[in-house]
Amino acid sequence: MKESLMDVICCPLDKAPLELDVDDEDDEEVLAGTLTCTECGETYPIEDGIPNLLPPDMREEAAA
Amino acid sequence: MSGDGSGGGGGNGNGDGLAARRGVDDAVVYQPAEDSGLLAEAAVAEAHGCVLEVGTGSGWVAERIAEERGLDVVGTDLNPHAARQARERGVEAVVADLLSPFRADAFDTVCFNPPYLPTDPDNEWDDWMEHALSGGESGRELIEPFLADVGRALAPDGVVLLLVSSLTGYDEVLDLVDEAGFAAEPVVEESFPFETLTVLALRRA
């Protein structure tokens, strides 16, 4: 994901802003990292350049 | 939408290599069909500003908008295999449930080709391809929550491009559009042997 995506995404649970922690990036985008809700503290992974912003209960279900 | 459900597959992606993974992705991701072509045609004509495609699937429609209009396009899907395919096409991909992780007024254009086939609850397949095709018993189970929330994520002068099949109930969808505070205008329409597909442009009434 490009860092500019931060301007449009929010926590799916309470719509609060997210904080980005980068674990791996290239010149253009973030490849791995964590998005943390500044309000409720829920975390969302970024893997292979794709943020998973499903609510936690749906994330478990979609893991198959 | 060709909903014979035979393309579902188990989708237990254990292949390590990219090629193996791509094979699995193809089996469990809805691939472009007539409805995709119609939505792309309407979206290329009507899109402006910052664009979101909900339920992007393979990312084909999002890619068309980005290439032909030079706009920034974000594509979401519930299905992580789909998000991966969309990303391989160069689409900014997000795994998401409809519009839930997007800020208020974030997008000028929102496109959606919803899973719309009415499905008997006793006859559901419960795999990724079903998620891509089935709109539940009414055919409108995803359209309802989408319309209820899209006004939040849409900028004040924004436009929603929604694909509707006659199988889903055109008048019932228009009622939902009205309830959500939008006015609908058909942009493109095409008839097929078993359904008529229409792309509606929705703007705040």
Image: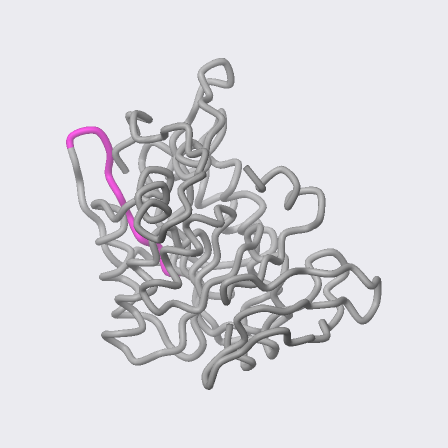
Q: Position of residue B172 (x, y in %)?
A: 45, 37
Determine whether B125 is above or below B12 in the image.
above
- In the rendered image, residue B199 lying in the magenta stretch gets the answer yes
Number of labels in the image equals 0
The figure's colour scheme reads one colour
Camera-side residue of A27 and B40: A27
Location of the N terminus of chain B (image quadrant): top left
Which quarter of the figure has residue B171? top left
Task: Decide which of B14, B35 is in the foreground and name it.
Answer: B14
Of B13 and B50, nearer the camera is: B13
Q: Residue at x 55, y 61 (%)?
A: A47
Which of the 4 image quarters holds residue A60? top right
Q: Splitting the image into 4 quarters, where does residue B62 fall?
A: bottom left
The residue lying at 21 percent from left, 45 percent from top is B34
- What span is colored magenta in the figure? B193-201
Q: Report whether A2 appears left or right of A19.
A: left
Magenta segment includes A8: no
Asked if residue B158 is positioned above or below residue B111 in the image, the reply reads below
Q: Residue at the bottom extreme?
A: A27
Q: Residue at x 26, y 69 (%)?
A: B44
In the visual, does A32 lie left or right of B173? right
> In the image shown, does B113 or B23 lie closer to the viewer?
B23
As drawn, B191 above or below A13? above
Q: Position of residue B198 (x, y in %)?
A: 28, 48
Which residue sits at x=52%, y=45%? B176
- Residue A15, position as x, y percentages in the image: 72, 64
Q: In the current view of this chain or complex, which residue is farthest to the top?
A: B122
**Residue B124 image point, x, y percent:** 46, 21
* Dominant secondary structure of the residues highlighted in magenta in the image: strand
